[in-house]
Amino acid sequence: MHKMSSALQFARRRVAIAKDHETHWAPNIDVYATEAGLVVKVELAGMQRENLELTVDGNKLRISGQRPDGCRPPQCKFLVMEITYGTFERVIEMPDDCDLTLGKALYQNGFLRVEVPYATKSSTPHTISVTDD
């Protein structure tokens, strides 16, 4: 089993408001180790696979997209609003012994699961496609 420091900060959480007043949010994630590599599990209820983008740059996995807010009537007044809509992003810095070039992603039942095997690091930026099954 590969050793990892519990002090590693895998993910950077960003929440901001852009100039267009659109909220940018960061979904909840779990990152855990298996015998084969690391697994990143992202909570993304209400998303469409087409609205997700995964990019890799060195040892950084960037998960981004947009969750539209199209199911509420205009001019409604919220009593409670806890669901975040709009553009989101999460950047996860993977350990050097993970090979993001061999990463696989699956989006199912509101969760994105990215499996990254242990190997050597890639230095070429690229994308990872997301499948339904």
Image (cartoon, rainbow, N blue to C red):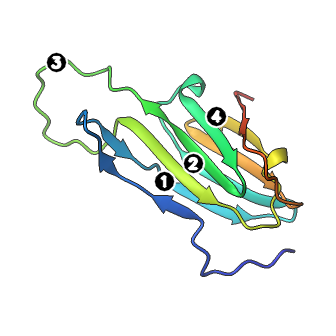
Estimate the x, y position of residue 80 in percent, counting from the top left: 18, 43
Q: CA distance from mark 4 to mark 2?
A: 11 Å
Q: Is residue 23 left or right of residue 91?
A: left
Of the image marks 3 and 2, the number of the one nearer the N terminus:
2
Nearer to us of marks 4 and 1 is: 1
Rendered image: mark on residue 99: none
- Front residue of this view, candidates 116 and 81: 116
- Front residue of this view, candidates 132 and 119: 119
Q: CA distance from mark 3 to mark 4?
A: 30 Å
Relative to 124, is 29 above or below? below
Rendered image: mark on residue 42: 2
The kind of residue tagged 4 is Gln
Local packing at callout 2 (Cα closer than 10 Å; few below 14, some 14-19, many 20+) is: many
Of the image marks 3 and 1, the number of the one nearer the N terminus:
1
Rendered image: mark on residue 28: 1
Rendered image: mark on residue 74: 3
Q: What is the secondary structure assignment of the residue under circle 2?
A: strand
The residue at the point 14 percent across, 35 percent down is: 78
Estimate the x, y position of residue 104 in percent, counting from the top left: 78, 42
